[in-house]
Amino acid sequence: MMPNKKEKNQFPKYLALIGVAAQMGITIYLGAYLGKKLDEKYPSEKNYFTIVLTLLGVFVAIFVIVKQLNRINQE
């Protein structure tokens, strides 16, 4: 018995959603790591590079995830 078209298209959606948390984590981690390295190279009283790049990583991760989820929902 052949699966209908709707069931066949559902699997990639779930597969795409599995990596969402990992993708967010990696993006935020890379921002924090780069910020920490820049703070070590250019020391200051506060860790401005770490703070800014971590927040930038959070915003970029959220933006990319929202775009992916919109694309998945439109399919």
Image (tube, rainbow, N blue to C red):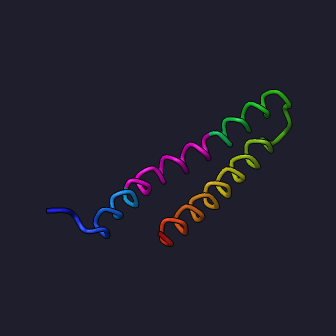
**In the image shown, does 25 or 8 lie closer to the viewer?**
8
Name the quadrant containing residue 44: top right
In the image, farthest residue toward the left: 1
- Residue 39, image x, y percentages: 79, 34
Question: In the image, which residues are magenta?
Answer: 15-29
Name the quadrant containing residue 43: top right
- Residue 66, image x, y percentages: 58, 65
**In the image shown, does 36 or 1 lie closer to the viewer?**
1
Give yes or no for residue 12 being in the magenta stretch: no
- Residue at 68% in and 42% down: 31
Q: How many marks?
A: 0
Give yes or no for residue 17 being in the magenta stretch: yes
- Residue at 64% in and 39% down: 30
Above/below status of 19 relative to 7: above
Horizontal side of 44 relative to 11 (left or right) equals: right
- Residue 75, image x, y percentages: 47, 69
Above/below status of 14 relative to 22: below
Image quarter hosting the N terminus = bottom left
- Residue at 80% in and 42% down: 46
The overriding secondary structure of the stretch rendered in magenta is helix
- Residue at 72% in and 35% down: 36
**In the image shown, does 43 or 65 lie closer to the viewer?**
65
- Residue 51, image x, y percentages: 73, 47
In the image, farthest residue toward the top: 41
Horizontal side of 29 relative to 5 (left or right) equals: right
